[in-house]
Amino acid sequence: MIRDTTLGAKLWAAAIWTLVGFFVLNLFAMIGTVVTSSFATRWLGTWLPIGWTTRWYDSAWSEFQLGDVLLVTFQVVGAVVLISGLLGVTAAYALARREFAGKRLLVLLFLLPLLIPPITFGIPLATVLYRTGLAGTFWGVVVANLVPTVPFVILVMIPFIEQVDPKIEAAARVFGANTFKLFVHVLMPLLLPGILAALLLVLVRTIAMFELTFLVAGPTSQTLVVALYYAVFAAGVRAVQSIDAMAVIYMVTTLVWLIIALRFVNPTQIVTRAKQQPAH
Amino acid sequence: MHQTVAPSIIQGPSLRQRLAARGFDAVTLLVVPAAVFSLCLFVYPFAFGLILSFEPKSGGWLSNYVRFFSDSFLYDTIGKTLWLAVPVTLLNLVLAVPIAFRVRLMRHQRLLTTILVLPITLGTVLVAEGLLNYLGPQGWFNRTLMTFGLISQPLKLVHNYWGVFASLVITGFPFTFLLTLSYVTGIDPALEQAAATLGASAWQRFRHVYLPLLMPGFAITFCLSFVQAFSVFPSAVLLGAPAGPTRVISIAAYQAAFEEYDYSMASAIAMIMGFVQLAIVVAVLASRGLFYRGPASGAKG
Amino acid sequence: MTIALSQFNEVRLDNVSRDFGALNALRNVNLTIRRREFIALLGPSGCGKSTTLNCIAGLLPVTGGAIWLDKSRVDTLKPEERGFGMVFQNYALFPHMNLRQNIGFGLKMRGKTKAEIDRKVDEALRLVRLQGQEHKLPGQLSGGQQQRVAIARAIVIEPPLVLMDEPLSNLDAKLRLEMRAEIRRIHNELGATTIYVTHDQDEALSLADRIVVLRDGVVRQVGTPKELYEAPAHLDVADFMGFRNKLKGSVVSHDNGRAVVDVEGAKISGVAREKLAVGAVAFAAIRSDDLVAGEPGPNALAVTVDTIEYRGREFVGTARSRGGLDFVFRSHVAVEPGAAVHLRAADERVLVFAEPA
């Protein structure tokens, strides 16, 4: 690393930090606007609202049936996390430990749903789900959300499993562990941090997954983010503050899990997936 | 390779052994559920959508595509989407590169990356909702500019092109930046030091050492960021003018499917959307072949 | 010869210090390197030898003192303005450039003409014996070849000073010996002034004109390989130079450069290397080669043999005294483990040091 101390270099650095500061400032101001508005009695044409209240949270809760929506959200997320964990970890184990014909093709197949934006494959997927009658149901939403999360778990877990020396498994077998005992006593403890990280990321992504849920959800199977979309879309019917209160509830739900997830993963992992695993 | 040694008296290996020798054994089978799942819910819908797009409600097998490319209300969406996605992606990349180079030297990177990951995890719907207030005529942004006397009338920043543009920067920049950062930090700093001892100035080090090594990474970053921006949907509806300048292609596809219930047409639009993305990605990645691709460190093992 | 090195008389480090926060990585290092000299910086990891090199190269700013190239001060210059050649520990070859481009990089940065670059690169390729490989990428070369490229790249710019940062540490033992000879040959041919960082005393002894031993950021001793090998100034330098037996005792007498130490009741006499006070704790340091198993007598200690290894011409054994001191010794005859023997060293082969501060 070479640090330059000339005037030009200092100006350049100052310009870059100003840019970063401007971005972060706007980001926080945007979030601050939503939070402020959700506690405002009346906020028109002034810097800050006239008064403060929490009643919008009550009204948002009852108007948007947030109790039901939150319940559905957590059920969907729970099911997605469990199923993608089960399918993903087992497949990742096979891909990490075996070389076989067609493996590269299979990895590509798992990579595509992560590279193609959900709205692109979501429309044909929704069409199929409507034909089969799954769309609109709870399981339709779960199945649609699994399409990107199963590959996500696979790609995060492969390098984790590759890190575990196969000789450790061989040693466990030599000392008399069968496949089940091997899994419970040796693999699970070693892989647990990786599995936890992968599943937490799945959880955060599923709460925030708008497009797929939006395309296949019915009135009784929509998650919080879709309900928020409809509320903003139909703005004017209800008070802005009420929608903002709902947005704050959504933010808190997401951020709580994000903070938990960040205890186990690096923020860059949320974006870069498994590709950037250090080679050394 | 894991292979059970069975004392075989019969001549030749059994089928199971022959499969195992090619890498197919019980462990390999673990991949089957996920593979079947992906085939049913990813490959099949795509294939189904492709075939469905050639079975229009009326007219010949190509009439969906003919209709798309003859109706300016439909084919204009490609141009409008590109007009949003390409400038936003380029801007994000141009901003991300110098910032990533600076942040790489930083000791407390994690705080900044955590802040930047916020808009990505909150998602486009929340960003759209937040910007609606923040950038609105009475919002803090316009209010601040007016206080400093930079403008006399509030700028119109929502329900038009710029609202969607801003939302794509807020969610897209962190994504582009974090990808770029991971590529930049993947390069051995000793290479830059070596270039410096050989007399290369800061700009020459970037031009001759970093840039050629980073080009493949930048190409991938561009593709991923572009594809995200190209499929913009909720913010184009909520923050933009969904009947006018921000009627992007995903809105057209959504309307065909869920307002006209013409799944065949919707599939056709989705296929066109996928094709445009693919064409740009392939073009960018093909140009990647011109550059060095390989480990970006000074030595092997 | 077309690679001609810049003319100058000396590089001088004047009270150079480098702090990392509260940690003093280097403290007041003074050192003068004369033209054509090969200097080795030797010390354990964390002693400050790489920090010294990076400060000279300009990759780390100094936090105190100055570095001079004859009459011009260089520590205020950016690394690209100093014009020193450097060979990095992991070579740091540009992976996207072929050998010719890698070696020619420094000349290109200096805006030389293509003809001149080609001519000098050819000369450098010949010097490191890599002709015919110039269109390969670094990834296609073996470790030893990469090392040669790194050396060629550093010397082709005709630097006043070549800096080498543990250049052989990534090679296997056999290749390391080969490359050591290669570095020696190139140095003889060009006479490039070189500062060579290493933690391997064999490398330092065989390559350097002078060795600088560093410890905790302080220069402990500067001298020719012979001086350091035969007359280390401190116990830690002696330890580095292969004095594996360090017998703790108390000073009985000290005069005329001779000292007698009481080690577990036995009187061991040797050459005093530091100022000693009678009655104070001191160490008698002896190389394992100089400690021979034999009969009781003067300068001998009674021990019990632990292990014995056959080494072809002789035996090397380990032993332990009644007081719990450990010994490594040499023997012409096979002694059995468990046998009681006496170990003896000649007076002039024993160095006596004061207890380190």
Image (cartoon, coloured by chain):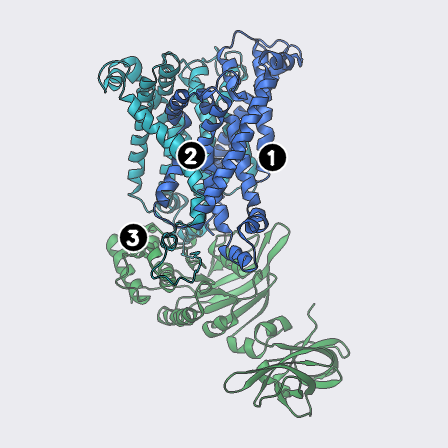
Residue B211, given in percent of the width and then of the height, sits at 37, 43
Give me the chain that's blue. A
- Can the viewer see residue A280? yes
Where on the picture, by quarter, is residue C120? bottom left
Chain ID for label 1? A
- Residue under pointer 2: B37
| Subunit of label 2 | B
Residue position marked by numbered label 1 in the rendering? A260
Residue highlighted by disc 3? C112
In screen coordinates, is A54 left or right of A133?
Answer: right
Question: Tag 3: residue type?
Answer: Lys
Look at the image and give the colour of chain C.
Answer: green
Q: CA–CA distance between discs 1 and 2? A: 29 Å
- A276 up-or-down from A144: above or below: below
Q: Nearer the viewer, residue B45 or C92?
A: B45
Q: Position of residue A27 (x, y in %)?
A: 53, 25
What color is chain B drawn in? cyan
* Residue type, mark 2 in image: Phe
Marks 3 and 2 sit apart, C-alpha to C-alpha, by: 61 Å
Q: In which quarter of the image is the N terminus of chain C?
A: bottom left
Q: Is mark 1 on a helix, strand or loop?
A: helix
How far apart are the two marked residues, 1 and 3, measured between alpha carbons?
A: 57 Å
Residue A8: x %, y % from top left: 45, 38
The C terminus of chain C lies in quadrant = bottom right
